[in-house]
Image: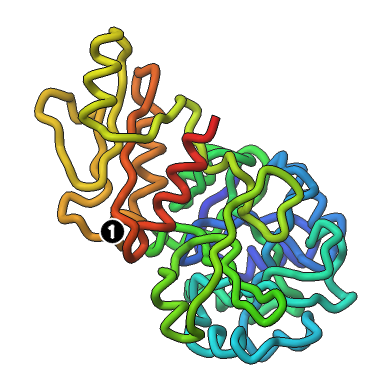
Amino acid sequence: MAEIGKDIEKAAALLSSGKLVAIPTETVYGLAGNALDEQAVLSIFKTKKRPSFDPLIVHLGDKAQLSDYVKEVPEELEELASKFWPGPLTLLLPKRGVIPDLVTSGLDTVGIRVPRHPLTRELLQSLDFPLAAPSANPFGYISPTSALHVQDQLGDKLPYILDGGTCEVGLESTIVGMEQGQVIIYRLGGIAVDRIESAVGKVLILPQSSSNPKSPGMLKSHYAPGIPMVLGNLDELMTKYRQKGIVFAVLSFNRSFPELSQELQFALSPAGDYDEAARNLFQGMRFLDRAKVEIILAEELPEIHLGKAINDRLRRASAK
């Protein structure tokens, strides 16, 4: 079983020898390997059981390293990097040849970000290579937001988990790129759309696709618990499944249900705070996935602040 600790030197030594290490970021925990080492990258895909057509994000310790790995940065994306790095923003940029095609699933663009978590920034700055690091969970399952979540899911498949506490954002990064002069959001995430637009003007939000994604995190069904999840009006859903005699649990934005036991309900933010709801989303899904129920009922949030990104994850978790 993987050791959990805060030893940056140990993590760096393992990564330098081609091994994988789980790392904390402000978004979720990542399954990290040397992005320039094809064998390490292959290990990431194998460990996660991630399809090779779904590209990986490359993590840098500092914005100054960007020119080593990408050919150019459009002015608008440079503006976003200056404003939101380090932080939960991934930029999709034309890659240099040093980045293996395996990382980008053969695409000529690479997703790059500078994470904000102090432990991982220190780790990255101690290495002479960047880290490829998708979320540290089996492919398609709920993303991990603590070291214990990683150990529960992948603990027998890697030697070390760098413990940085609970992730403060709790949603994956927002992925942004450009096509024909238009700024495009490929994946909604930890930076709300209105904050992106305040920096670069109106953006286009791409819907997720079911195959051959242009960037990480664009697959239709993803982030899902083991128990089927249904999205809709909670009052109507609860009445419907109660009448059918089906045992359910409920994931709500901010409501509690006195008729349900505490084990069968989870409110993302009783105070109605979107940041708190984002931080608790994967934890709440994981909590209800342990309930003795046949189905999880969930509701969408208002489409403001991080509500759009939370709803994106809920829709994918409930995709048939």
Q: In this rendered view, identify the residue nearer to me: 4 or 229.
A: 229
The answer to whether residue 236 of the structure is visible from this angle is yes
Looking at the image, which residue is at 51% across and 37% down? 224
Residue placed furthest toward the top: 245
Query: Is 265 drawn above or below residue 18 in the view shown?
Result: above
Residue placed furthest toward the right: 97
Residue 1 pos. (x, y %): 60, 39
Residue 243 pos. (x, y %): 24, 10
Q: In this rendered view, identify the residue nearer to me: 187 or 284.
A: 187
Q: Is residue 220 left or right of residue 199?
A: right
Q: In this rendered view, identify the residue nearer to me: 115 or 300.
A: 300
The answer to whether residue 154 of the structure is visible from this angle is no
Query: Is 114 drawn above or below residue 232 in the view shown?
Result: below
**Amino acid type, label 1:** Glu
Look at mark 1 in the image and give the residue it sits on: 276
Q: Is residue 179 left or right of residue 25?
A: right
Query: Is 38 drawn above or below residue 1 in the view shown?
Result: below
Check the picture and name the quadrant holding the C terminus: top right
Determine the secondary structure under disc 1: helix
Looking at the image, which residue is at 46% across and 50% down? 312
Looking at the image, which residue is at 71% across and 63% down? 132
Q: What colouring method underlies this structural image?
A: rainbow
Q: Residues within 10 Å of mark 1 (few under 14, many from 20)?
A: some
Residue 120 pos. (x, y %): 55, 71
State which quadrant residue 170 falls in. bottom left
Residue 71 pos. (x, y %): 81, 85
Q: Is residue 85 left or right of residue 270?
A: right
Looking at the image, which residue is at 41% across and 46% down? 282
